[in-house]
Image (cartoon, grey):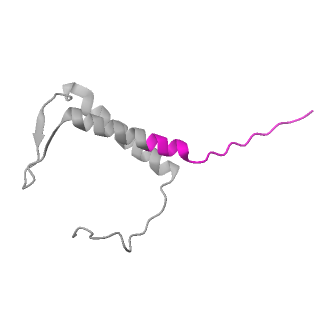
Amino acid sequence: MADLTSLDGVKGQEINAEQIRGILSQIDLDLMNLVRDGKLAALKYGVNGAGGQSTDRAANLRSLLEARDYYQRLLESHPVWCTTQAQVE
C-alpha cells in the first residue's frame, strides 16, 4: 500500500479506555521483553536499507517509557463515572 500524501478523507474514532488499557498492556510486555535476560545491552542494531538507520536498546527503552507515559496520561484524562448508593435506616 502506498504512503498517504495528505490526511484528507482519513476518518477515525476516538480511542476508548479499554483500547488504551490494551495498548498499555502491549507496551508493558515489550518493556518486559526488552529488559529481561540481559537484553538491555547498549548494543547498536542496524536496519538494512537505504536509510541505514540504527538504534540501541536504551533508546528503545526510553521510547517505550515515553509512549507508556503518554497513554497512561491519556487514560487518566478520560472522564470517570463513580456511582454510590446509601441506605438510610
Pick whichever, 76 or 39, lies toward us: 76
Give the farthest residue toward the top: 38
Q: Indicate yes or no whether the magenta region holds residue 60.
A: no
41 versus 25 height, above or below:
above
Q: Image point 72% across, 43% down: which residue?
A: 83
Pick whichever, 20 or 78, lies toward us: 78
Q: Residue 83 vs residue 73: left or right?
A: right
**The magenta stretch spans which residues?**
71-89
Q: Position of residue 34 (x, y in %)?
A: 25, 33
The answer to which image quadrant residue 63 occupies is top left
Q: Main secondary structure of the magenta part?
A: loop
Task: Report the label total.
Answer: 0
Q: Position of residue 60 (x, y in %)?
A: 24, 38
The answer to which image quadrant residue 8 occupies is bottom left
78 versus 29 height, above or below:
below
Q: Position of residue 87 (x, y in %)?
A: 86, 36
Pick whichever, 32 or 40, lies toward us: 40
